[in-house]
Image (cartoon, grey):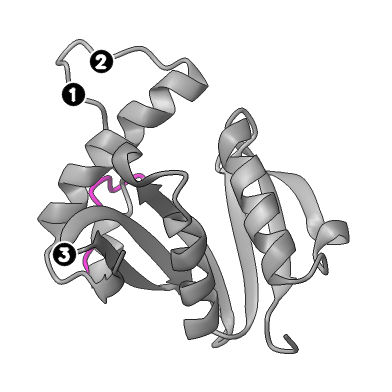
Amino acid sequence: MNISISEADDIQVIRNLIVLYIYDLSEIMGWDCPDNGLFGGCDELPQYWGQPPDNSNYAWPKNWKGYPFLIRVDGKLAGFALVRQLGSERSYDIGEFFILRKYRNRGIGRYVAYSLFDRFPGSWQVAQMVGNTPAQAFWRNVIGDYTSGDYADSEGIDDVHGMKLTIQSFSNTGL
């Protein structure tokens, strides 16, 4: 199995995948399908390419830089990851992370997460919606293994833009 992670130059590919991502989340979060039959997107997505957000009311911090990535397995599209560099030069978070169902539970997500952490040394935050227990379990496991358990005291719940999030924090500069 050949896993590749490449910088995404086409916003539309990730825009299309986000609909599947939100659909998957709807099962976990109990969201209903909108009347138009299309699940939403990601308001700040254009900011990963240095463009204004889709929703002018969207209020993420202005001083971040985005790194959008496409994930392929054996040359086939398998998902995406969106990394944000926050105000500090060496402070990052996972904005969004999605692996298509066909490729789950095969170590691909772990491989991609480790690769992204290694690519961007510094302080990290990884957040999940409080109700998204499968994502919480995935990230606790991945970050726990990646840091050899050196993050356990750095997990908390925070309210970000009216959404309750579980957040794991760690630094990979000394690993």
Residue depicted at 43% across the width and 20% down the height: 27
Q: Residue at x 20, y 10 (%)?
A: 35
The N terminus lies in which quarter of the figure? bottom left
Query: Where residue 128 appears, x then y in whole percent?
Result: 58, 44
Evaluate if marks 1 and 2 touch, with contact meaning CB atoms under 8 Å apart: yes
Image vertical order of residue 113 relative to residue 116, above or below: above
Residue placed under numbered mark 3 in the picture: 75
Picture coordinates of residue 175, whole percent (x, y): 72, 85
Residue 98 percent coordinates (x, y): 37, 48
| Badge 3 or badge 2: first in the primary sequence | 2
What are the residue bounds of the magenta stretch? 50-57
Q: CA distance from mark 1 to mark 3?
A: 28 Å
Q: Main secondary structure of the magenta part?
A: loop
At label 3, counting other C-alpha atoms closer than 10 Å, the crowd grade (few under 14, some 14-19, many 20 or more) is few
Q: Which residue is mark 2?
A: 34
| Tally of numbered tags | 3
- Mark 1 vs mark 3: which is more N-terminal? 1
Q: State the SS at label 3.
A: loop
Secondary structure beneath dot 1 equals: loop
Of 14 and 159, which appears nearest the observer?
14
Residue 74 % position (x, y): 21, 63
